Image: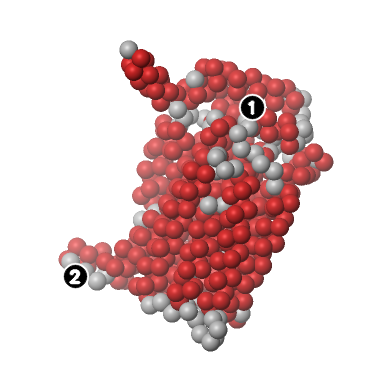
Amino acid sequence: MKSELTSVAHEASRERSPIGIILIVALSGFLMGFDGSLFTGAVVYVKETFALTNLEVGWAVVSHTFTATIAIFCAGPLADRVGRRTVLRAAAIIFVASALVAAVATTMVALIAGRMLSGFGVGAVLVAGPMYIAEISPPALRGRMVTFNQLFIVFGIALAFSSNYAIVRLNDFDYGWLAALRLADWNWRWMLGIGSLPATLYLFALLWVPESPRWLAMHGRLDAARRILTRAHGEAVAENELAEMRVSLSHEAGKKEAGLRDLWAPELRGVLMIGILVGVFQQITGISSVLAYATVIFERAGAGADASFMQTVYVGLVNLVFTVFALLLIDRVGRRPLLLAGMSGMAACLLLTAYGFGAADGAINPRIVLAGLLGFVASFAMSLGPVMWVLLSEIFPNRLRALAISCVGLVNSAVCFFVQLVFPWQMENMGGTRTFFIYAVFALLGLVLIAKMLPETRGRSLEQLEESLVRHV
């Protein structure tokens, strides 16, 4: 009898779990990682097809980031106005369209147009996905749940690298149906066009996702918010969360719509500075360059064409495995310890990579370069990669969360744009040793500043964090 009651209780708990909803929303991260990383392999062939210079290659890569920067700034206010779910649906449609436009492009202008269109989708899901997950997750599991979004991003990256490698390897097989696909001539077109498939599936999956309960509460729809929270967490938890929301909303009553000036309120400057610092150091340490130019880096380090694609697959797999470690640890160890340990590892591995590009005899050592980059990616994947978005979804008050995440995301994406744009020039004119040494210096600087300023946030509700960190701005 006791075992039957236990079984029923477990079944009821599963019915109330928001995991299914969270996993669907987190697939937006998969789209971002998959779509954005397909160009890592395609860029080698695009450069040859259109006879691009190094700066033109940089622009082909960062055109995607340029529009993502714009979209990040707009996505937060838009998500407040029309809802988190609506923004995610629009992003799915954008991903489908952008993949098809890029795949059929016959000029560089058309290809860039497809890349820029994709950037709008990236910016939208970067803001709306983690925000939605944080707003529907129970406090004890929020860090892990938001990390699911990062897990799906890196899974998308790994699958994109593997997809590119498979397309390259399929050229070696002499089958009639493969010849009809013209993989040798259209390799980069297939690499980019395949991104339309998961985006289409995601658009249909969103039909099962309700709107964010906190967004509904912010717009006075408390009954709808109660129904969603009850289905997700059970009636008792739902009522407690609604009570905290009402208190938070009462503090915001009579205040005008959130604006940029509100972000500079004295009470908010501390958390805003933390968000900006984490956002800057996530990108200025070079992760976007490593992921976007991995194939090019390994070729420069001495790997052949096939080997460079295979080593890029290793990067994707390491990124995926260590993001899983972050998922398991973030709510047990906390955000701060993961960041400090990860940034220490990033600095050490970037120094190792710099040494590999100019070892004692002045020659490039491809094994040291590979080991250094894999260690760097592993350290990033268990720290700055997932922790940044968890922190951004936690430290800002409900009324300003969307706008604040957009602003920090804008800074993050702008730094990413600059780092990716200048990387080909850096490698050509400064070499790998100096380039990666500069990244290591930034990692050490970030480690010192974050150790000094970052609070721990795990285990507390969004409203409790608002009470302790920003005091009703």
Residue 218 marker: 1
Q: Determine whether the residue tagged by mark 1 lies in a helix, strand or loop.
A: helix
Amino acid on which disc 1 is placed: Met
Residue 187, visible in the rendered structure: yes
Residue 102, visible in the rendered structure: no
Nearest the eye: 22 or 321: 321
Nearest the eye: 110 or 381: 381
Using residue 457 as the reference point, say whether residue 94 is left or right of it. left
Q: Position of residue 56 (x, y in %)?
A: 54, 73
Counting the numbered discs, the total is 2
Q: Could you tell me which residue is drawn at 61 percent across and 38 percent down?
A: 458
The quadrant of the picture occupied by the C terminus is top right
Q: Position of residue 460 (x, y in %)?
A: 63, 32
The residue tagged 2 is 174
Crowding at mark 2 (Cα within 10 Å: few <14, some 14-19, many 20+): few
Q: Is residue 334 above or below residue 141?
A: below
